[in-house]
Image (cartoon, helix red, strand yellow):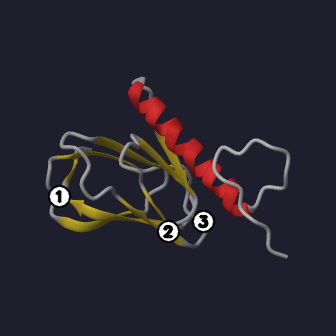
C-alpha cells in the first residue's frame, strides 16, 4: 500500500514513510557535521561498504569485508589545506581502493592491516603526508 509522505518537520501523530524518515536522518546528519565543524570538533565518518567521503570529514574509519574490497572516493574539490585521515580498522584480507588524485596518481590501495593515510589537499590534488 502507498502512503502520503508528510512534509518536513511535521510533528503530528501519524505513520512515517521511509521517505520521511530518510529525509529526517539525512538532515540530522548534515546538521551534526555542520555543528561539529563549527565547534572545531573532529568530524568522523565510518565505512563498511563503498562510499564517498563528505567534504567536512576529518577522519574516515574504514573496515573492508573479509576477502572482499570496497572503494572510497575522496572529496573532489575541498578547500585548499583540508586535512583528512584515513584509517583501516581491521586485518582482513579485503582491500580498500581510495579514488581521487593523490600524489599524481588516480587512486591508492590500502591493503595492510591497520594502515593509515594522512592527506592534505593542495588545491589541485591530495598529498600523502605519511
Q: Give the SS element for disc 3.
A: loop
What secondary structure is found at the residue carrying circle 1? loop
Spot occupied by residue 22 in the image (x, y as percentages of width and height) = 65, 57
Asked if marks 3 and 1 touch (Cβ < 8 Å), the reply is no
Query: Which residue in the structure is indicated by mark 3?
Result: 65
Label 1, label 2: how far apart the Cα atoms are: 21 Å
Kindly tell me whether residue 127 is visible in this rendering.
yes
Question: In the orientation shown, which residue stands out farthest toward the top?
Answer: 39
Q: Are marks 3 and 2 in contact (CB under 8 Å)?
A: yes
Left or right placement of residue 51 versus residue 6 in this view:
left
Task: Give the mark, 3 or 2, whose residue is nearer the N terminus.
Answer: 3
Q: Position of residue 27 (x, y in %)?
A: 56, 46
Res 58 → quadrant: top left
- Residue 84 drawn above or below residue 73: above
Q: Quadrant of the N terminus?
A: bottom right
Residue of label 1: 103
Which of pointers 3 and 2 indicates the residue nearer the eye?
2
Residue 58, compared with residue 15, is above or below; it is above
Name the residue that disc number 2 marks.
Answer: 70
- Measured Cα–Cα span from mark 3 to mark 1: 27 Å
Crowdedness near tag 3: few (<14), some (14–19) or many (≥20) residues, C-alpha within 10 Å: some
- First-in-chain label (1 vs 2): 2
Q: Nearer the viewer, residue 80 or 9?
A: 9
Q: CA distance from mark 3 to mark 2?
A: 8 Å
Label 2 neighbour load within 10 Å: few <14, some 14-19, many 20+:
some
Q: Residue at x 38, y 42 (%)?
A: 56
**Depicted 122 relative to depicted 101: above or below:** above
**Residue 73: image location, x then y, percent:** 38, 62
Q: Which mark is residue 111?
A: none
Amino acid at each position: 500500500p502507498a502512503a502520503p509522505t508528510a512534509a518536513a518537520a511535521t510533528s503530528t501523530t501519524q505513520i512515517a514513510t521511509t521517505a520521511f524518515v530518510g529525509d529526517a536522518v539525512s538532515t540530522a546528519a548534515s546538521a551534526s557535521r555542520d555543528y561539529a565543524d563549527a565547534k572545531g570538533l573532529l568530524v568522523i565518518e565510518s565505512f563498511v561498504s563503498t562510499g564517498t567521503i563528505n567534504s567536512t570529514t576529518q577522519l574516515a574509519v574504514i573496515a573492508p569485508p573479509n576477502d572482499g574490497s570496497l572503494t572510497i572516493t575522496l572529496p573532489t574539490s575541498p578547500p585548499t589545506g583540508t586535512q583528512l585521515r584515513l584509517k583501516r580498522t581491521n586485518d582482513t584480507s579485503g582491500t580498500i581502493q581510495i579514488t581521487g588524485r593523490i600524489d599524481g596518481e588516480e587512486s591508492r590501495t590500502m591493503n595492510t592491516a591497520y594502515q593509515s593515510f594522512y592527506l592534505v589537499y593542495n588545491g589541485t590534488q591530495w598529498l600523502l603526508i605519511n
